[in-house]
Amino acid sequence: MRRVLIIGAGRSASSLVKYLLDKSDEENLEVIIVDISLENAQKLARNHINATAIEFDIFDIDSRQEVIRNSDIVISMLPARFHIEVAKDCIAFNKNLVTASYISKELMEMDEDVTSKGLIFMNEVGLDPGIDHMSAIQVIDRIKMQGGKIILFESFTGGLLAPESDNNLWNYKFTWNPRNVVTAGQGGVAKFIQEGKYKYIPYHKIFRRTEFLEIEGYGKFEAMANRDSLKYREVYGLDDVLTMYRGTIRRVGFTRAWNVFVQLGMTDDTFVMEGSEDMSYRDFTNSFLSYSPHDSVELKLRYYLNIDQDDVLWDKLLEIDIFNANKKVDLKDATPAQILQKILMESWALDKDDKDMIVMYHKFGYELNGVKKQIESNMVVMGEDDTYTAMAKTVGLPVAIATLKILNGEIKTPGVQIPIRSEVYKPILQELQNYGINFVEKEVPYLGYNPINQ
Amino acid sequence: MRRVLIIGAGRSASSLVKYLLDKSDEENLEVIIVDISLENAQKLARNHINATAIEFDIFDIDSRQEVIRNSDIVISMLPARFHIEVAKDCIAFNKNLVTASYISKELMEMDEDVTSKGLIFMNEVGLDPGIDHMSAIQVIDRIKMQGGKIILFESFTGGLLAPESDNNLWNYKFTWNPRNVVTAGQGGVAKFIQEGKYKYIPYHKIFRRTEFLEIEGYGKFEAMANRDSLKYREVYGLDDVLTMYRGTIRRVGFTRAWNVFVQLGMTDDTFVMEGSEDMSYRDFTNSFLSYSPHDSVELKLRYYLNIDQDDVLWDKLLEIDIFNANKKVDLKDATPAQILQKILMESWALDKDDKDMIVMYHKFGYELNGVKKQIESNMVVMGEDDTYTAMAKTVGLPVAIATLKILNGEIKTPGVQIPIRSEVYKPILQELQNYGINFVEKEVPYLGYNPINQ
């Protein structure tokens, strides 16, 4: 039996564990699931004969080193900041490591050690980052192989609701870490390049400078710019690309409404509000509006942000109950972002049988033999239920497939890496198709950024 | 002769030096002016028989300690971050110290040493901070003495143009450090309290949430909120005050136009722009707007921020030339804020005979014997010329007066402090009147925040 150690049994580990257990007999796998909550680990183990659930504190060095020493490969599904300790142990005990997180600087600095020991530390092999890299690089490599030159690359991903569960005015519920949704876009200017021109959007304008996209069979979506669209320019070998833009997908109308929170200052996570514990939702809203001895909070907000009373935007604000004077915030020393998150979690929690949906969309513009061409490709994945969500599938399955292929020696190149080598992305994308995770691709005329073409 | 050491001979030291030299015979003063630029120091010394100008590097420990050891009192007019080294030497050599800067945490921590040695480290004794503290506390102490209870305190200060030099559309030129003007309001939410309600304004809204104020004989002004209005609540003994608001004064219309820079992202000082050196002013503006192959930068900006072509706001933007395709930024690796500063310095530099103006305005609301009352008080100071500016007078004279009074033993209480003791503020405010720096005070009905009263 070969021991696969999975550290962290959160929601996104369900499909990952299921894949490995389903293959455990034919592949001779023993799956060890460790988590700070034994219950979480047991839930994923499902009493499977090849699964073991263990309660585990990542900061207990002895037990961490013991489980890592006794494993054949390690998957860390912990929050990214905890990977580093696991990675050090993996080097010490000569174990390969797989994560779905962005490579940190500290992890990158281990590359020499990892490579010299012939180990593989595969990162960013989930959804975003993960499937986005693999599906993009596959097309980019193919175009380059044909002799084409990439001039435009745009890539968008969104964790959304399946149409059948889309039953609130925002067309949105939390299918992923709510905190990341509330603070999305903060911490710096959004930077990208379009037709050779660098563009910068400050945080308070990100939700008003969106792009539309249409996906056949699923309708219209909008996307706001990610913070650093240029990050992978070098990694993807696109140094001379004229347009490079990465964004986050929402249903049309979401960002316009979210912008209300941004304009008011409700997404700020940098300061604690006075008396937050005893505040009502109405007090919370009012603290971002001018003082008035008689005007209502509602009218002040409508005037301040120029919202018509018959604008659906207004109904969206009513739906989440931010004018309620009876509901208490009940969070001590909370930031606006923490309070907003609490308020939204009441309205945007998934119901028991709600299903989620993942949408990914790429555009590739290129020049081949003097002719400009464009390829559009998209992936839509639906969740099965509240355990095997689209998010869990798209994050967990590529991690699981990568793990098994490393274990079986099909992925060979050592080093701290992301899945942009054909040795890695080809078999993973191939196998993902068996799980309904595949891209629909079409060739379209080159549109670029000239609206006359559109 | 008693030696007064002045470290830092910048523009704000002119009136300070003049005051001390004018009194040097009767008061037996020798004024030592040291600066990194000998020319600056000599300019202020004006070959006066009691003045000595010395070239001086604050980081040259030996010469710094020598001048401090040989002085009877030290004035530091350096940027605030350099005070700490001077302060350490002052403790070592038992010298009193005077500055016009905010007390840093490090300086505050010296209080025990300073007090036990019987030394006086007087800080925040310039204009703002300085005259604002003294003039406010004088009225607050008087009201408390009468048995009144302060319920409202608002305080506003602005460095502006004298009406006779007010000849651009912005009604503004740089009379003070341009960098501070460009980055004003950044680094955190603006926080204050009005009628018992805490209010928070995010940076991108500060310039749209202004207050108006009227000063007899000088017309209407506007003020935007400072970052931390509550900072002096405890220091002023106003823990139960219902309204506390501090702001920065501009001529009406300034903030509405400045808001364009904020909305675009031009005041951001946190990132370097790609290719800033070779950018034109027009490129700079365009980098904050959507890409378009045919729409003009002008139309894109007007559409984006909804500016009518006959709005004076538009003329203000034309006046500063931000659409000029021929003027080069010519700054390597510059932030948007640095580029904006350069552009504005071309339009907003003071002409040789321009005069500046300082405006300060306080409101005090209080309850006395069950009756609510209000006092408004204001100070307007005009510059004489480009050396003895209103800024130099209002910053330098209180520093100079405090220095002489400490030297003469009239200010006695030791410790690291700000000028809120009557022993300090009374004689200083009294003497400032001889220099045309005085407050006009009037009792008005209590207005508070109820517009029905206004």
Image: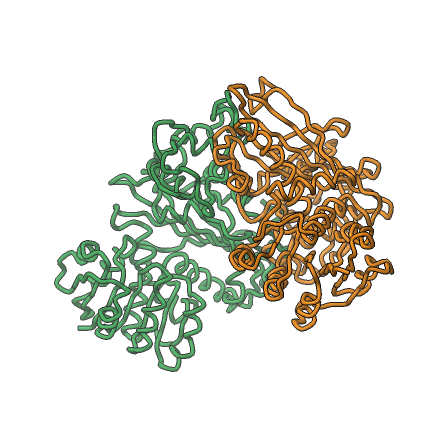
Chain colours: A orange, B green
Identify the residue at image location x=83%, y=54%.
A25
**Left or right position of B19 against B394:** left
Front position in the image: A36 or A426: A426
| Residue A374 screen position, x and y as percent | 60, 24
Q: Position of residue A50 (x, y in %)?
A: 83, 60
Q: Nearer the viewer, residue A164 or A419?
A: A419
Q: Is residue A364 visible?
A: yes
The N terminus of chain A sits in image quarter: bottom right
- Quadrant hosting residue B195: bottom right
Location of the C terminus of chain A by quadrant is: top right
Residue found at x 76% / y 41%: A318
Nearer-the-camera pick, A92 or A223: A92
How many marks overall?
A: 0
Q: Is residue A301 visible?
A: no
Q: Residue furthest top?
A: A452
Q: Where is residue A426? Give x, y as percent.
A: 66, 39
